[in-house]
Amino acid sequence: MNAAALAGAAGGALISLLVAPLAVARAPQALTRVNWRGRPVPAVLGFPLAASGVIVAGAFAARYPEEARSAGAVGLVVAVMAAAGYYDDRRGDEQERGFHGHLAAARDKRLTGGAIKIAGAAAGGMVAGALVLDGWAVLETALLVALTANAVNLLDRAPGRAGKAALFAWLPLLVWGDAVWSAASAGLLGALLVCLVLDLRARAMLGDAGANPLGAVLGLGLSVSLPPQGRVAAVLGLLALNLASERWSFSAIIERVRVLSAVDRLGRRGS
């Protein structure tokens, strides 16, 4: 990790340390969810994550104006997906599940929170892609942002699961990925490290407003880090993963596979 990324991660962690306790203490009833153990938990970690991601991306753009477009792409997808996720969180649980359910509702002229997230991810991903890439890569970026956001959100079913998955996906991108993206998105990574502690202890949940920005930024990172063939492979792989979720329960698979179950439970306390 380069010096700018380290500074950004430290800044994101600090912002999250300040914002997260306030978000938990003032969580509205509409954002309270019953977790898998039947305990009420506030789904408010999207606030510190979004604040850290946007502020650090803005600071990076101010410090390195020649990289303002890349930083703007990061800040944009964080802000759009946090807002769309918050809208969905406020609506509460919906009967519709997965892309099929939300698109079917849209055909029946019913607007769901999931449809808002799909539209937000597509639009935000297109604009972000246009800021940093060109040609077909813009469309590929939009697909990666949307598919990765949904994939991480699918894992937000147990304390720490989505956060750990995002962290494991982030590590290879930090080592082999685009250095500018790493630095511009480092605020979100630093905030994730703080929020993961609260999530694992069932003090708070990511919610859609937290899980979707994490996935969206990872999708953007994949797009700017991979060659053209790699982007296509990533789109196809993530599409297959999302379609598989329509048929099979990832939670059930994680519980059945010993290694996945052990990693899933790692660090979890009082949940």
Image: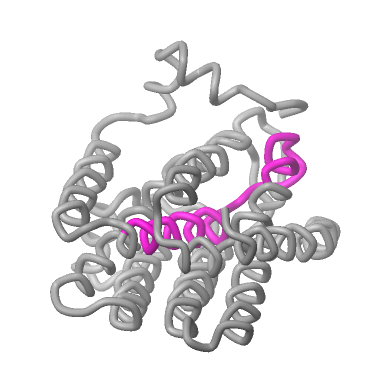
Question: In the image, is residue 100 above or below residue 11?
Answer: above
Residue farthest to the front, as pictured: 3
Question: In the image, is residue 237 above or below residue 126?
Answer: above
Question: In the image, is residue 193 above or below residue 11?
Answer: above
Residue 12, position as x, y percentages in the image: 70, 63
Based on the picture, tell me whether residue 17 belongs to the magenta stretch. no
Residue 253, position as x, y percentages in the image: 37, 21
Point 54% across, 43% down: residue:
167
Is residue 29 found left or right of 181 in the rendered image? right
Residue interval drawn in magenta: 196-222
Based on the picture, tell me whether residue 200 belongs to the magenta stretch. yes
Is residue 248 found left or right of 256 in the rendered image? left
Residue 30, position as x, y percentages in the image: 67, 61
Residue 211, position as x, y percentages in the image: 52, 53
Q: Nearer the viewer, residue 21 or 236?
A: 236
Task: Label the magenta part by its dominant secondary structure.
Answer: helix
Point 33% across, 72% down: residue:
125
Q: Nearer the viewer, residue 238 or 116?
A: 238
Point 52% across, 76% down: residue:
75
Q: Is residue 149 visible?
A: no
Q: Nearer the viewer, residue 189 or 208?
A: 189
Looking at the image, what colour scheme do you see? one colour
Question: In the image, is residue 175 above or below residue 126?
Answer: above
